[in-house]
Amino acid sequence: MRLLLIEDNQRLCQAVAESLRAQGFAVDTAASASEGLRVWRAADYDAAVLDLMLPDGTGLDALKEMRERGNMTPVLILTALGAVEDRVSGLDCGADDYLVKPFAMQELIARLRALLRRPGAALGRTLTLGSVKLDTSARVATVAETPLDLTRSELVVLEALLRNQGRVISKERIAECLYDFEKERSANSVETQMHRLRKKLAAAGADVSLRTLRGLGYLAS
């Protein structure tokens, strides 16, 4: 899953981004409304975390513009503005959730996962295909209830495949889940992760098929 974090406090932005990456998310960051809009327009995000008080204006302006463009990415506002009228204004402008600073990191992560479990977002706590299960919160995969030893990248690829089971998912979309803008991508990175994941699933006796459809992408069934 790929997230956008728009926050001008550098230390807070880094701390939040690192915590989200530790949970298996790819995270892009922006420090202003204008930069956030530029990045937002350039990629598809599963959710966005948005500060309101930004150096070049309010985050609500960025939110309004994206909603007017028809972009329905789930948005969580993260701000020090905690008055009732501020919350109402944020939600009325198109935000899906509102969290006031200071906050607990665990609550932010839990709220994002709740947003991504809503209809259309397709992030259930547990994803299942045949004998394979993935707990997206605990970041644990099992085959017939036996834990599977996967790297972070392999877990991300497995999650993308299970989330799209029965449908073709492109190599580019998997790469977006694996890497944010700050990480260098290699041409064979997705193929490498797929190869390793297939070997580990086969060794564990998983009854799933991860097919490569040339020119289209991958299909889990």
Image (spheres, helix red, strand yellow):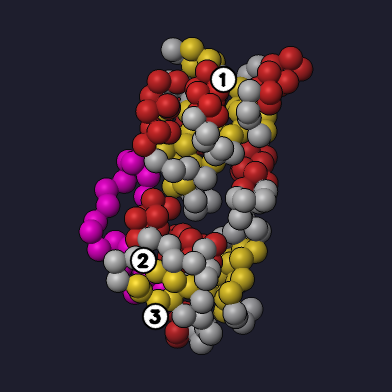
Query: Which residue type does callout 2 highlight?
Result: Gly
Residue 199 — which label? 3
Residue 111 image offset from top left, x and y in percent: 66, 41
Mark 1: secondary structure: helix
Query: Which residue type does callout 3 highlight?
Result: Lys
- For the residues marked 2 and 1, what is the alpha-carbon distance in whole angstroms? 37 Å
Residue for badge 1: 60
Locate residue 117 relative to residue 210 in the image: left or right. Answer: right
Residue range in magenta is 178-198
Query: Which residue type does callout 1 highlight?
Result: Leu
**Badge 2 or badge 1: first in the primary sequence:** 1
How many residues crowd mark 1 within 10 Å: few (<14), some (14–19), many (20+)? many
Residue for badge 2: 217
- For the residues marked 1 and 3, what is the alpha-carbon distance in whole angstroms? 47 Å
Q: Residue at x 61, y 55 (%)?
A: 122
Confirm or deny contact between disc 3 and disc 2 (CB under 8 A): no
Closer mark to the observer between disc 1 and disc 3? 1
Residue 117 image offset from top left, x and y in percent: 66, 51
- For the residues marked 3 and 2, what is the alpha-carbon distance in whole angstroms? 18 Å
**Badge 1 or badge 3: first in the primary sequence:** 1
Asked whether residue 1 is drawn in magenta, I would say no
Confirm or deny contact between disc 2 and disc 1 (CB under 8 A): no
